[in-house]
Amino acid sequence: MPDAIQNMVISAYRIPTESLESDGTLEWDSTTLVLVEVEGCGNKGLGYTYGDACIGDFIDRRLKPRVIGKHPFDIGGIVADLSASVRNEGQPGLSRMAISAVDSALWDIKAKILGLPLCRLIGMVREQAMVYASGGFTSYTDERLAGQLGEWASEGFQYVKMKVGRQPESDVCRVGRAREAIGPNVSLFIDANGAYQKRTAMEQAYQFARYSVSWFEEPVSSDDLAGLREMRENAPAAMRVAAGEYAYTGDDFLRLLQTQAVDVLQADATRCGGITGLLEAGCLSEAFHTPFSFHCAPALHLHAALCIPAFFIGEFFYDHVRIERLLFDGAGSPVKGMLSPDLSSPGLGLTFKTQDAAAYRIK
């Protein structure tokens, strides 16, 4: 059928970090990108997720046969069928990440068939996305932390984020060094990745407030909705509590919003169902009058973020920026903290650099 999806190619790439990296709860020395390329109607759409290479095997074995032969415009029906098919594996986790990569590839090919940038297809409400520079890993020395954040401030970023939580006794001093490096006029965000217990998180919040920290991400585990709400209600007034990067379904986002657990709702299209899931999360944010933020993978998120009325800011994450520039043509660079799409390129505006990526291919 000439108007159907005719093939889907799945591959995986492991890219080493520059050095061992860590946050409050995890250490890593590489990141794996699983790529999905959907072919049909004379076009190729791409999508991806960050996770274990076994996600690619799952896509190839379980999802691909259910996608081949479908019309590339029928994204809603395809994704609903894929979601139903993984009932016994569970919606959260690896199966949802697999669906996320497929969904984003479907949106990309649909926009390419129509000759439109994805943001024009969905419907733009803004022309640029504000982003914050994100890194400041707990594995960094104080000198490297200050150097990285200070460089971002000098490049014009108005918001920067660092990691905390691995050594709570050192965190206040590290935050002080970061503030000194970026000066008084750049907003400082912190991310504990759920490392703190509730009492410690609250005590730390008031210490961090001395350095005008305005964003406290996952001060406690994102599974602890009561703890997040208590933090949000009792933290310094100028400090927003953010969470949502580990939400996989619309129900996950709804629980965060209904329990009033966050000041800012985060979502990650590589986990929450691709572009479709991201837009759903954005609609929920709008309905609950809550600012919305995308998590990591800026090249994948940009177009959809421009179409979400509740969007506030996105994450320009150091590791993913490096990988996306390494593996794709078209991954943009912010100007004074603002990221803009290339409206002359259809779809996501990304072209996979197959030859450059070959050295990192593991599947």
Image (cartoon, rainbow, N blue to C red):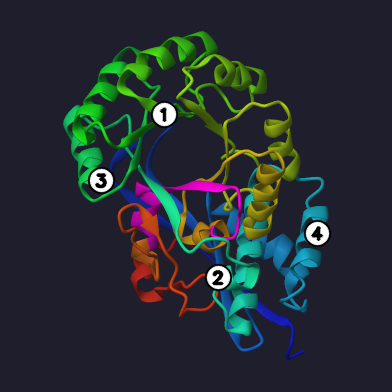
Residue 246, percent across and down? 59, 38
Q: Earlier in the sequence, mark 3 or mark 4?
A: 4
Asked if labels 4 and 3 touch by Cβ distance under 8 angstroms, the answer is: no
Measured in 3D between alpha carbons, the distance from the residue under mark 3 to the one under mark 4, in whole angstroms, is: 41 Å
- Identify the residue position indicated by label 4 in the image: 80
Residue 167 visible in the current orientation: no
Residue 314 visible in the current orientation: yes
The residue segment tinted magenta is: 306-324
Task: Please give left or right for residue 8 compared with residue 347 in the image.
Answer: right
Q: Quadrant of the N terminus?
A: bottom right
Q: Secondary structure at mark 2?
A: strand
Decide: few, some or many residues near mark 3? Use Cα within 10 Å; few <14, some 14-19, many ≥20.
many
Residue type at mark 3: give it.
Answer: Trp
Residue 214, percent across and down? 41, 29
Up-down relation of residue 325 to residue 241 (above or below): below
Up-down relation of residue 274 to residue 46 (above or below): above
- Identify the residue position indicated by label 1 in the image: 214
Asked if labels 1 and 2 touch by Cβ distance under 8 angstroms, the answer is: no
| 281 is within the stretch colored magenta | no
Q: Nearer the viewer, mark 4 or mark 1?
A: 1
Residue type at mark 4: give it.
Answer: Ala
- Identify the residue position indicated by label 2 in the image: 46
Q: Residue at x 51, y 8 (%)?
A: 199
Up-down relation of residue 17 to residue 6 (above or below): above
Please state the total of marks drawn on the protein image: 4
Q: Earlier in the sequence, mark 4 or mark 1?
A: 4
Measured in 3D between alpha carbons, the distance from the residue under mark 1 to the one under mark 3, in whole angstroms, is: 17 Å
Residue 106, percent across and down? 65, 70
Q: Which mark is residue 152?
A: 3
Q: Secondary structure at mark 1?
A: strand
